[in-house]
Image (tube, rainbow, N blue to C red):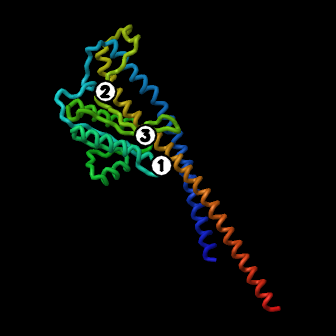
Amino acid sequence: MAQIRELKKRMVAVRTIQRITKTMQMIATAKFTAALTRAKATRPYTDRIRGLVGEVSGASGSDFSHPLMASPSTPVNRELVLVITSDRGLCGAYNGNVLRKGSQTVKALKVAGKEVVLETAGKKAVAYFRFAKIDIAERHTFGDKPQFAQVEALANRLISEFTDGKFDAVHVVYMRFISNARQVAESMQLLPLAAPQASGSSSNYEFSPSGAEILSDLLPKSVVVSLFQAFNDAAVSEHVMRMVSMKSATDNAAGLVRTIRRNYNRARQARITTELTEIVAGAAALE
């Protein structure tokens, strides 16, 4: 009797968990759809501005230089690493993969003799690096919907500190969204910018004002949109991995309910058989 009661209570508890995970899966699906729409909307602009930088750079000549495209003239052996994670858990291996990549990036820079300044976006990164006893210089919180104005302010600050010679380079560790089935933890060098690849037709362009002036305006914009795209990719990856994780949890709960129900029915049938056996034995004893 006690075993049957225990199984029934466990079955009720697992069904409750199943309803919770199903609800969280539906919420994650809705958030993923909205985040994917935002990321897809910004991707063409990001790709186009990068392509435009390459075309203008090719037309401006190989002698063009800009502070954002070169390391400081006097290196300070200090580099900044920004790690983007989520504020909440229950999203599978999302945070684990990003934090592992972030730790590898920090370790590689330290092995190379660089001083690392660490900044984080997301509470999970704060908890992880605090546990690892690694100091965090700045903590940022952008939520599920990173706003362009907030990211732009952060990017402008990084640009200003880089051009002032406080850092030799700026790296961003985030989860890059490739498809619904594939997300990759990536360490992107935000600054200095890599030399753009010019297209073959760029030499036919004529610029007014000069290509150098246009690039001076385009390059900071390229840094801002690249960082904003990284935050958008991170948000999409978080929601899709949470959606998959909650679906798996819901399916596992359904399978566990079936197993418990089978064990419950077996225990119930065994109890009925035992009671019938006792009744028959008692009747036989009275004859």
Percent position of residue 260, x then y: 62, 64
**Relative to residue 166, is residue 208 depicted above or below?**
above
- The circle drawn on residue 193 is 2
Q: Position of residue 21 (x, y in %)?
A: 55, 54
Give the residue number, with chain letter if any, for mark 3: 234
The answer to which image quadrant residue 15 occupies is bottom right
Q: Residue at x 52, y 49 (%)?
A: 245
- In the image, is 7 to the left or to the right of 104? right
Farthest residue to the right: give it: 287
The residue that label 1 is drawn on is 92
Nearer mark to the viewer, of 1 and 2? 1
- Marker count (numbered): 3
Q: How far across and how far down the image is residue 81, in percent?
A: 30, 39
- Of residues 40 and 83, the one drawn nearer to the viewer in this rendering: 83
Disc 3 residue crowd, few under 14, some 14–19, many 20+, Cα 10 Å: many
Front residue of this view, candidates 122 and 178:
178
| Extreme residue in the bottom direction | 286
Real-space CA distance between mark 1 and mark 2, rounded to the nearest whole angstrom: 33 Å
Seen from the viewer's position, the closer of residues 250 and 264 is: 264
Is disc 3 in contact with disc 2, using a CB cutoff of under 8 Å?
A: no
Amino acid on which the number 3 mark rests in the picture: Ala
Q: Residue at x 51, y 42 (%)?
A: 240
